[in-house]
Each structure stands twice: as C-alpha cells, then as structure tokens.
Image (cartoon, rainbow, N blue to C red):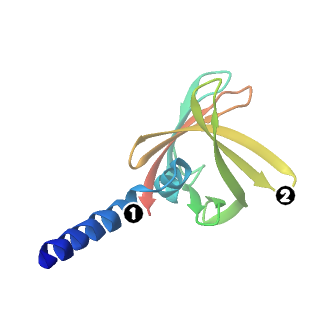
Amino acid sequence: MRSHAVSTLIGFLFFYCSACSFTDTKEEKLLKDIYGTWEWIWSSGGFTGDTIYPSSETGRVLVVFAEGHVYTRIGNKKIREQGVFSLGYDEARNLALITYKNGGHVYRQWYYLAAPRTLTLLDQGADGFVSGYVKIAD
C-alpha cells in the first residue's frame, strides 16, 4: 500500500513538473517566437505598389528582437536604430501589434508569424508597406 502511495506521488510530481512548461502566458509565448535575428527579404506596397528586394543598394537589413524587450535595426552592418519594444493586440483589426520606442519616437507595426521562422510586418503609415523577414538566428 505504501509503495502504491509513493508511486502515485512520484507520478503526480512528474505530471506537475512536465505541465510547468505549459504555464507561459500568451505574451511570453509570443516573445519566445519573436526573439531572435530576422533578415529582411522583401517589401511591397507604397503609393506605387512596388515590390523591392535586398540589393547592393539596400544591403543586408536585419532586425534583432532580444530579451529585455530590446530591438535593434541593422543596415549594411551598422546599427540604424535601437530601442525597446512591446507586444500588444489591435482588437479592431484582429492583428498582433509591435510598439517600438526609440527616445521620444514611437511607432507601431502589425505583425504576423506566418510560420515558425517567417515574420510579416505591416506598416501603419499612409504608405502601407508590408515587409517579409526570415529568422536566421534564435
């Protein structure tokens, strides 16, 4: 009887500890998905509806989302912008939202994780650009 109680207790503890990984909040899950280095692969939109891709003119463009809610935009191996970000949700449009803060400058982009390593960012400005990124490092 005692061995049955001990094995039941061990089973309960095993189940409880394995369930701990499922206790992340929605924001923690989104942060885990977005943390990492993302490389720009295309943008489309604007007033003319053009699609642009990385070239020798644009160079390599990266966005790094790091723990502590820090983001860094890198172009041609130079830091172009750095600040903090937060994740939210635009209820009216049913879209996830990133808010960037860099000094006194604040701007927002809707975002969509199309696949585990594919990120789409949608500008909220009048030009309406949509940009695609692929995750190159966690």
Q: Name which residue lies at 57% across and 60% down.
A: 64
Q: Name which residue lies at 65% across and 23% down.
A: 92
To which residue does mark 2 refer?
A: 103
Residue 59 figure quarter: bottom right
- Residue 67 percent location from the top left of the image: 59, 66
Alpha carbon of mark 1 to alpha carbon of mark 2: how far?
37 Å
Q: Is residue 62 above or below residue 5?
A: above
Q: Secondary structure at mark 1?
A: helix
- Residue 33 percent location from the top left of the image: 46, 53
Q: Is residue 79 above or below residue 106?
A: below
Answer left or right for 23 relative to 131. Answer: left
Q: Earlier in the sequence, mark 1 or mark 2?
A: 1
Label 1 amino acid? Cys
Q: Name which residue lies at 60% across and 49% down.
A: 57
To which residue does mark 1 refer?
A: 20
Residue positioned most to the right: 104
Q: Name which residue lies at 83% across and 49% down.
A: 105
User: Mark 2 packing: few (<14 Cα in 10 Å), some, or many (20+)?
Assistant: few
- Residue 65 percent location from the top left of the image: 58, 59
Mark 1 in CB contact with mark 2 (< 8 angstroms): no
**Closer to the camera in the image, 75 or 15:** 15
- Image depth: mark 1 or mark 2 in front: 1
